[in-house]
Image (cartoon, helix red, strand yellow):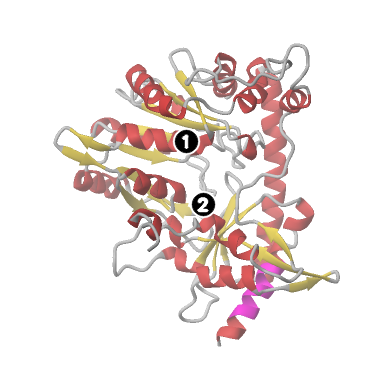
Amino acid sequence: MAPQVSEHFLSRQPSAIRLAQIKFAERNDKVKAINTAIGNVSLPMHPAMIERMKNLTAEDSPFNDGVVAYSSTVGFEETNKAFLNIIASSGFNTKDLYSQITNGGSQAMELVTLGVCGKTGTSEKPLLLIDAAYTNYGAMAERLGRSTVSVTRTLQNDGKFTLPELDTIESKIKETNPGAMVVIPYDNPTGHFLDHQTLSQLGELCVKYNMWMISDEAYRELHYVDEDTSSVWGLTDKEVSGIEGRRISIETSSKVWNACGLRIGALVTDNELFHQKAVAENTADLCSNVIGQYIFGALAHQEHQDLQQWYAKQRKYYSEMMGTVSKEFKELMPEIIISSPDASIYSVVDVKDLASAGFNAQDFVLYCAQEGKVEIDGEETTLLVSPMAGFYSVSEGSENPGKTQMRIAYVASPEEMKLVPRLFKELFEQYESNRN
């Protein structure tokens, strides 16, 4: 008799973000895939980081003698200073902020969920999400035995996502008594930009109902609208009385700094007790990758002007590519809905006005990964995207908006990204033809 696997493991399915890649890897033909399912940035890191990576055994490197020892759990002082320097470079005061290094933004998400949700006194406090919400928040909560609740924004025909009215959000808070609200100002998966005024309004609700405000700032500075940089660190007691002491941000090397595989992140807060307990909780994981910490630590020494130039370069790269792809989609498929390219590195496409009855985005994604192909310049090619249903939490019996929606990540080369609308159109037509 085989040993038993836990019910939790038996229930697990691959993340919607990784599904297409996993299924494509099982193909035996020689079809090429343009992978836009995962936010796996394919650009070089900041030059200062590259310099350190190339010189790990240099005389001034801590690894020059071949010894790779643990750091403290909180992380190298230099690496924490790097994250604070980055926040400060966007114009925010970091004087009273506490930082700890984590294994990417993902571990920061896990720690913060442990720290602000679950058993509090006599009540169980869930985590409040704004759907469509990054899938790993729900996955982390389930892994940890925490629950989530959500309010749902809407993708309009003009490509703009709209938040629910504030009184709708407030009603959900009254109904569910969450411990914290998660905001993603430069949103994954929607590309929705939450400006300062919106963050201020949401912050007021956090204060009113004594919640933590968690801001996932993985894509901070990647916005393509005429607005100031938006951040939880732009909110102060002068504007939102009581917000200080309940602010937390999740930071990462992955996106703005093009270092997804470095797996270095940070949990930053202005609450000393939360910081102390988060570090204590993380002692079970000993420390984060010290080589990654050292490479990222180079940014502690960069002038703010240099960092601002870097942000401008990244914005130009993405805004041009997102604009080109969005325009091509509308020309090739006039009835498609594609989200406005306002922030981050993602677009959501909705085929509800094109698809025949019973269309399921996940089935289409699997078709593309497992058998779909289009000949381009003599090479058979397919497209990998993410189905959006897993980004929404819907009650039983309710229609999931993500059933006709897919997320596209702008992580392939500009030349490959130009092919995405054509690939999507032809694969969609193949799939619909086979269904009907």
Q: Residues within 10 Å of mark 1 (few under 14, many from 20)?
A: many
Choose between 89 and 394: the one closer to the eye.
394
Q: Residues within 10 Å of mark 2 (few under 14, many from 20)?
A: many
Residue at 58% over, 28% down: 289
Q: Is residue 197 visible?
A: no
Give the number of the disc on residue 290.
none
Magenta residue check for 425 = yes
Choose between 30 and 147: the one closer to the eye.
30
Specify the segment rendered in magenta.
422-431
Q: Is residue 329 visible?
A: yes
Q: Amino acid at mark 2?
A: Thr
- What is the x, y in percent for residue 48? 73, 23
Magenta residue check for 189 = no
- Would you name the residue on which mark 2 appears? 190
Q: Is residue 203 left or right of residue 321?
A: left
Q: Is residue 233 left or right of residue 416?
A: left
Q: Amino acid at mark 1?
A: Gln
State if disc 2 and disc 1 touch (CB < 8 Å): no
Residue at 68% over, 52% down: 323
Give the number of the disc on residue 107.
1
